Amino acid sequence: MKILLTGAAGFIGSHTAERLHEMGHEVIGVDNFSTYYDVSLKQQNAKALKDKGIVIRKLDLRTADLNAELPNDIDCIFHFAAHPGISGASTFEDYYSNNITATYRLLSFATTQSEPPYFVNIATSSIYGLEATYSENEAPKPASWYGVTKLAAEQLVLAASRGGSLKSTSLRLYSVYGPRERPDKLYTRLIDCGLNNKPFPLYEGSEKHLRSFTYVQDIVDGIVSVLEKQTICNGEIFNLGTETESTTAEGIATVENLLQANIATKRTPPRAGDQSRTKANIDKARKLLAYDPQTTLKEGLKAQIEWFQSLNQDKLNK
């Protein structure tokens, strides 16, 4: 298949692009290389993909002429591109333009093709709100601009399915971690602090937060499984994550154990919209996609530490 993958230089997008390429698909990756975090990390991800023969192009979905810039014979779109997180430095316009406008324009491109591609929307557990422990049938109650705009993007995609413009599915991902995790995310920051003797900024009360920390390759297993089950997935939403819950405090202790280090913490005010609990209800994905994540938190964090150390060794060697 010929697959377009947006957000290809990002954390989960780059891993999915690699997997699809390994499966024998032709992957065309696009990314706008935004400055939300260090662009050099995205460039490094892009180089890793290019070295494997995957096409990566710089393209902003919000402004580019997509009909002129993108191929017209795409079989499937995996839409990862988004403005993530709940950073206080981000404006509502950042979330709106990247999550809603970009999705609308990509959908407009897809639905005008003579044979519209299957559209896989990458959504988030933040759609559910402050607690994400529900099945896909529960009413969403997002509590952040990120969650609100990602829900709107999801509904744009599903509305196209309901209207018969194309076939699609939406995947709500839970607390993904692993190699290439963004530098603003929990475990990359923890590992950095542990290896470099820096205090870790801990949001007040967050040590008690519960999360379905899900290893990135387990997430990718679920994402790519949709390709072979497009008919039963059309118009459907799936939660993808692990059913195992861990507190942030347990995550910190696991990193400390693996690094054989004590990580000092620096208390900071709590973040508005931060989820207190996520536990992936994957009954539907288990039944229809045969989804079965297996990686333990310790196994996944060991791989992430090895990646982080390799990343920084490469910087020292340059």
Image (cartoon, grey):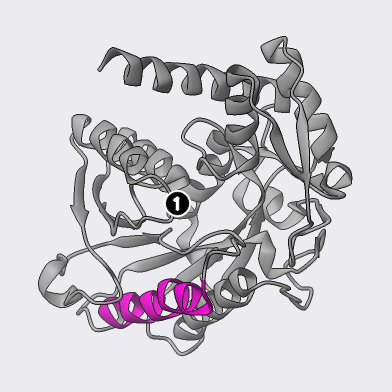
The crowd level at tag 1 (other Cα within 10 Å; few <14, some 14-19, many 20+) is: few
Q: Point out residue 100 in the picture as x, y percentages from the top left corner.
A: 46, 79
Residue labelled with disc 1: 228
List the single residue furthest toward the left.
68
Residue 102 to residue 5: above or below: below
Magenta-span inclusion, residue 70 = no
Outermost residue, top direction?
260
| Label 1 SS | helix
Residue 209 lies, in percent from the top left, at 84, 48
Q: Residue 18 location in percent, x, y?
A: 35, 37
Residue 103 part of the magenta segment: yes
Q: Residue at x 48, y 22 (%)?
A: 307
Identify the main secondary structure in magenta: helix
Image quarter of residue 167: bottom left
Q: Is residue 202 above or below residue 229?
A: above
**Picture quadrant of residue 149:** bottom right
Residue 212 is left or right of residue 55, and the answer is right
Left-right relation of 173 to 59 = right
Q: How many marks?
A: 1
Which residue is depicted at the point 71% across and 22% down?
255
Please state if 308 lies on the left or on the right of 126 as rendered.
left
Q: Quadrant of the C terminus?
A: top left
Magenta part of the chain: 91-110
Compared across the picture, whether 36 is left or right of 192 comes to: left
The residue type indicated by label 1 comes to Glu
Q: Residue furthest bottom?
A: 163
Above or below, comparing residue 141 to residue 8 in the picture: below
Residue 113 picture location, percent across and down = 21, 78
> What residue is at 27 percent from the left and 44 percent from the top?
25
